[in-house]
Image (spheres, rainbow, N blue to C red):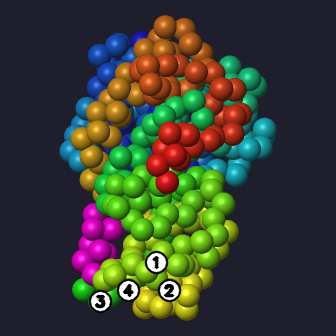
Amino acid sequence: MKNIAILCSGGDVSGMNPALKHFVEYSLKKGLQPYFIYDGYEGLIDNNITKAGYEDVAGIINRGGTKIGSARSKRFTLAQYRKIAKTNLDNLNIDMLIVLGGDGSFRGLDVFYKEHGIKFCGIPSTIDNDISGTTYCLGVDTALNIIKVSIDAIRDTAASFKRAFVIETMGRDCGYLALISSLTSGAELCLIPEIEYDLQSYEEEFKKQIKNGRRYFLAVVSEGIQQDSHDIADWFENKIGIESRVSILGHIQRGGNPTIYDRLMAYKFITHAINGLLNGTDESVVCYTKSGFELKSIDEVANVKHVLDKELLSYL
Ligand code: F6P
């Protein structure tokens, strides 16, 4: 029996648990022995690796986060620790690895492969949706749905009180979450790092709207913009003349019950990853593109700067 292991690295996403469930079930179906590596590359270094069976994944499909933990590992960037990681895998006869993570995690994996020949397949998993080569990263749909529910709730109180709300989403340097949330929530203002803006250019129009009876404004801003969200709120107060509040959504965007879409995508990503490794693709990332699933090289994915889809940007 061949052995295969999985780990989660970087920010957790809702969809990792369904992926773990299918990883175990599909590995066993394919005659492989599945292993879990706990707490990302940290667990790989610390030999926190155990065999996984059906009982380990019972009752987790509906849970956010990841049962096996995740981490951002500084030690894995150092050759001496990667050597320990390789010894740990050798001792268990594991030479295939699936990593749920972002592009930084994949770059580390690529170095590991080049040094020690451990075959791998990456599965893009980050709510930021900022990985080149794939239009979708696991967890994004759940995060967007959490944001949607939050904005809908904020709208209720904003309208009741005649207020402007500045709602800050996560995304690091990528404005995807803010852009999609703004479009699908009908926000009056959307600010993202990819687009330069000038608040002054909105002043006349917003003031006119208040005169014509507008009761509230929703501004969805990405955490990666240059200005602090409180400065945008001050601008609403001082220049537009409407009381304002800031709501930083924070880590609630990373949790919650995985949506149907993320559960299904988890299954598909895992199936393509395991099939890829069994068919002899030794170092790749499963990408979802307009033409379906593809295995792409690490260079196409982790070493190319991500850019937001032009069509989406044109809707702003
Ligand atoms: O990359 C995912 C992400 O949630 C970003 O959107 C955010 O900037 C960051 O992680 C937060 O990291 P931490 O959980 O370490 O605070």
The residue that appears at 59% across and 82% down in the rendered structure is 231
Query: Tag 1: residue type?
Result: Phe
In the picture, measured across the screen, residue 263 lies left or right of residue 227, that is left
Cα distance in 3D space between marks 2 and 3: 16 Å
Query: Tag 4: residue type?
Result: Lys
- Residue 127 lies, with reference to residue 151, above or below; the image says above
Instruction: Provide the residue designation for mark 2.
Output: 240
Image quadrant in which you'd find residue 183: bottom left
In the orientation shown, which residue stands out farthest toward the top? 279
Instruction: Provide the residue designation for mark 4.
Output: 211
Magenta span contains residue 247: no
Determine whether the beta carbon of the residue marked 4 sits less than 8 angstroms from the nearest atom of ligand 1: no
- Residue 254 lies, with reference to residue 217, above or below; the image says above
Q: Are marks 2 and 1 in contact (CB under 8 Å)?
A: yes
Determine whether the beta carbon of the residue marked 2 sits less than 8 angstroms from the nearest atom of ligand 1: no
Q: Give the magenta-colored segment's residue range.
A: 149-159
Instruction: Provide the residue designation for mark 3.
Output: 161
- Along the polypeptide, which appears first: circle 2 or circle 1? 1
Q: Of helix, strand and loop, which one carries label 4? A: helix
In the picture, measured across the screen, residue 170 lies left or right of residue 116, that is left
- Along the polypeptide, which appears first: circle 1 or circle 4? 1
Marker disc for residue 206: 1
